[in-house]
Image: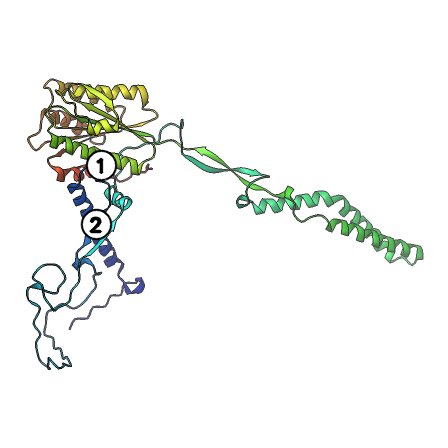
Amino acid sequence: MSLIIDRRLNGKKKSTVNRQRFLKRYRHHVKAAVQDAIDQRSITDVDSGSDITIPRKDLSEPFFHHGQGGHHGHVHPGNHEFHRGDRIQRPPGGGGQGSGDGQASDRGEGADEFVFQINRDEFLEYLFDDLELPNLLRKELKDSTDYQLKRAGFTTAGSPDRLNIVRSLRAAHARRIALSGKDRKVIRTLKRRLREMEVSPDPVDQQQATLLREEIKSLNRKLKRLPFIDDFDLRFNNMTRVPLPSSKAVMFCVMDVSGSMTQEIKDMAKRFFLLLYLFLERNYEAVEVVFIRHHSEARECDEHDFFYARETGGTIVSKALLLTHDIIQQRYPPGQWNIYIAQASDGDNWGEDSSTCTNIILDKLLPVCQYFAYVEITDQQHQNLWYEYATIAESYPDHFAMQHIRSYLDIYPTFRRLFEKKEGSHVGR
């Protein structure tokens, strides 16, 4: 018979490694449930709560125990129905096991799967866990809304929680020395004269000694009336607000709504941008979003028109990129803003325009933007825009990324790959 002794030092006889595996398995189930919810929902309810189901086999924490191998002998006391040595058959067809499979049974025991519900905030937390805007930098101090409190010496007024006890006691001690210095000097002089008169046999000197004692007592009483600490002595730590460099960012959402984009492709593009919008809204405070729709013409629009307008036409992608560049020049100076661009298209573009798009991205957009993300949404072969952009992604892997979406199931994994948190990143909300 094997004997396993777990000598690892963990509280309550629990293995930390096992517990971490247990919690990791839970998080895996939650994330899988979140992704399933994203795949099955419509655009309007993509950010609501969700039911999470933990399978019965994963409800208990793993522990060391003997397996079912070997020979085992069991002796049961029996009752009015069973006697010693009887064998009890398992319930047929999984009845009574609680998993929901098999036929109904009037016997047996089991356990149901554990089902709980997470609210909207918890759902979004898991949805955007470990995601970030790449290459986010601290920019100019102008219009900064972030401040940090820093020490700036001491003041004589302030709130009690900022009272500096050491400085206050030093000030009180200095005040007492300054106010009592003259009297203490007189006291020392009187004491010297008193010592001389006390040893003198002359009765006049004895009378003078009595007067000196009274005068010394009077001066000591005066010194004791000085307060140990006064309001004038109090010193407070002075704190000043120092503006922090702002991490303001702007996201350009560029969506192709040309005639080659079917309604299904447009829905997938809208779902991608909705995820992006929710991610920015939840994780960042100083991020603005600019919506641009384009077919043969490009225009800036509001959120409602971006998701629900129905105009369409031919396809000239370069006009949307030029409009993006113009808006950057007019409203978002690169020295003050982190600039991000996300473009969604089926990749079908007017033939000679794709090379123009490459030139615009290389010459005008990439030098001023932190990150350019392109998603091509089609279940067919790649279009000419994909091959043009592939050369840019190869040359600028840290600032340009592209992904291919074939179906609704690819949207959330693609979104995570584009905005996955990189090691060494340090600037966030």
Residue 381 placed where, x, y %? Answer: 6, 30
Coloring scheme of the render? rainbow
User: Horizontally, is 106 left or right of 203 in the view?
Assistant: left
Q: Can residue 26 be seen in this snapshot?
A: yes
Q: What numbered label is drawn on residue 225? A: none
Q: Position of residue 276 (x, y in %)?
A: 23, 34
The quadrant in which the N terminus is found is bottom left
Q: Residue at (81%, 48%) from the top-left corner?
A: 189
Pick whichever of labels 2 and 1 is earlier in the sequence.
2
Amino acid, disc 2: Asp
Seen at 61% across and 43% down, the residue is 234
Q: Nearer the viewer, residue 398 or 286?
A: 286
**For the residues bearing labels 2 and 1, Cβ distance under 8 angstroms:** no
In the rendered image, residue 330, in percent from the top left (x then y), is placed at 31, 19
Q: Residues within 10 Å of mark 1 (few under 14, many from 20)?
A: many
- In this rendering, is residue 122 above or below 324? below
**Residue placed under numbered mark 1 in the picture:** 275
| Element class at badge 1 | helix
Q: Amino acid at mark 1?
A: Leu
Q: Quadrant of residue 423?
A: top left
Residue 51 - label? 2
In front of the other: 219 or 104: 104
**Any part of residue 129 in sight:** no
Q: How many marks?
A: 2
Q: Quadrant of residue 328?
A: top left
Residue 117, x across and y down, in percent: 24, 51
The residue sitting at 26% across, 65% down in the picture is 7
